[in-house]
Amino acid sequence: MNLIAVRSIYRFEMARARRTLLQSVVSPVLSTSLYFVVFGGAIGSRITEIEGVSYGAFIVPGLIMLMLLTQSVSNASFAIFFPKFSGTIYELLSAPVSHFEIVLGYVGAAATKSLILGLLILGTASLFVPLQIAHPLWMVLFLVLTAATFSLLGFIIGIWADNFEKLQLVPLLVITPLTFLGGTFYSIDMLPPLWQTLTLFNPVVYLISGFRWSFFNLADVSLFASLGMILLFLSVCLGIVAWIFRTGYRIRP
Amino acid sequence: MTDMPTATQPSPATAPDTGHATPIIRVENLTKTYASGYQALQPIDLEIRRGEIFALLGPNGAGKTTLISIICGLVNPSGGRVFADGHDIVRDYRAARSRIGLVPQELTSDAFETVWNTVSFSRGLFGKPPNPAHIEKVLKDLALWDKRNNKLLTLSGGMKRRVLIAKALSHEPQILFLDEPTAGVDVELRRDMWNVVRGLRDAGVTIILTTHYIEEAEEMADRIGVINKGEIVLVSEKHALMRKLGSKQMTLQLQAPLGQVPEALAGYPLELADDGYALVYSYDASREQTGIAGLLNAVTGAGIEVKDLHTHQSSLEDIFVNLVRERQ
């Protein structure tokens, strides 16, 4: 195991985030905080509580998930897309590093960044709305698994994309809609019956439900369905990454 | 750039020898067909000797970069095997790659990184623990020390190329690949680059460079391999090859134009060019007697005033034509 290389990649990526602090940290925290101000403060006070939880607090787990998914994907996809785009990937490919080490370095850094963001947003949210965390360990587990899984997805997108447009395509057209429709702002009980059934095909529902359960003890689907879904997603992403490296898809012709 | 970079552990074992030792790179039956069906490499066999400078010559699209890319791990081979210092580049890629440094043809860089950081990153990526003294030495040898805190985007093209060399040397490789190191580089820098390469060779590094400038191969290489259409057409000691390919031209720029080649010079293979303002003499530079002295005397004797003169080596294209003709 070339741990020095893993650490080099990891540090390089973290240094990039520090260099672009405004864009990579301040901007997502600020934009998510706006939701708390608007929904938690202004509109939330006029919406009735959901199963005993104030609306402002109810949306916090969903919003953290929304940010976690989009940031994990964009961090990891950019991190591997850019060397491919600029050509500096030659060095990575010629280095004595295994595929696993490459993924560990890039995905580890991307996941770390979005975890830090998630915790920052959680802290910010607690300034605006009263928060309780019923199962802190479960909360951290969901946070870590989700960050890792979607950073892997981002890595895959970064390899697949051969231009900047494609890089944005999946986050904008798939992940954001699925998250908004995945119960960030509502409990799926509030939907008409047909939509309740359709929603169960949206994987993000399971993530948000499990994560929200760790806060308020209330869930749309069972805890183990949530956990199963994220583990399934993780395995699928791992499988695709393994396939990418075995075939050299778009990186090693 | 006065100092010679010394990249690696110069030990007697890696000193240049006469080629009797085991080759440092062995290419066996290597083929590459891209997914598009394009066959970039015909079955190739090649051996690079420990400590030599090997120039791989060939026109654009001949397969030079593909061959290098396979050896360095950027491209998967379709068939055949490659050994670097005895290690299979696929099965034993860690050992093989840790011995190899690659300077790519394209000037790619992490624009917002500093020189120091990007070179240190390369060392880490190759699994070597930090060694600021070595990085400092490499940067100083490449005249980059003053620029160590500059971001890469502020550097000139020549400086960027040196940074790529510094990155490749950061992990103390035994084998250095230089893919078109002087493409688009001005004359002065090209000289510098040649000095750098010689210094590395003296330090025990085996160097494989690709080029399509015959002058470069002539200036630098111990041995030359010619590749064309994915096939190694010939591998030869430089001196032997130069003798074989030694056709040159000398051009005399005249003060006044001539209508025809004067009688007195009829014994020489001369042609008029440039509306009579130039006399072009073709000769074999590898021969003992090139006939230049005699010609110049005869020109003076004929009362022709010469303003300037220069000589010109056959282009690589000419050489290819000759090679192909010979093979038929």
Image: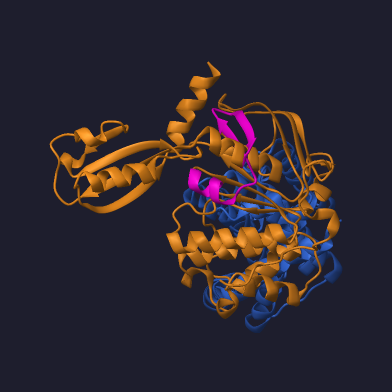
Q: Which color was chain B given? A: orange
Looking at the rendering, which quadrant does residue B283 occupy?
A: top left
Is residue B157 in view from this perspective? yes
Chain painted in blue in the figure: A
Quarter of the image for the C terminus of chain A: give it: top right
- Report the residue at 76% width, 50% height from top: B97
Q: Position of residue A82 (x, y in %)?
A: 56, 56
Q: Can you say whether A188 is above or below B162 in the image?
A: above
Relative side of A70 to A119, left or right: left
Q: Can you say whether B207 is above or below B241 in the image?
A: below
Relative side of B279 to B198, left or right: left
- Report the residue at 66% width, 62% height from top: B199
In the image, farthest residue toward the front = B301
Is residue A113 in view from this perspective? no
* Residue B99 forms part of the magenta stretch: no
- Report the residue at 54% width, 39% height from top: B242
**What is the magenta range?**
B214-238
Q: Can you say whether A104 is above or below A7 in the image?
A: above
Q: Position of residue B324 (x, y in %)?
A: 50, 23
Most foreground residue, A72 or A2: A2
Looking at the rendering, which quadrant does residue B39 occupy?
A: top right
Most foreground residue, A175 or B236: B236
Q: Position of residue A90 (x, y in %)?
A: 63, 51
Quarter of the image for the N terminus of chain A: give it: bottom right
Relative side of B250 to B173, left or right: left
* Residue B221 forms part of the magenta stretch: yes
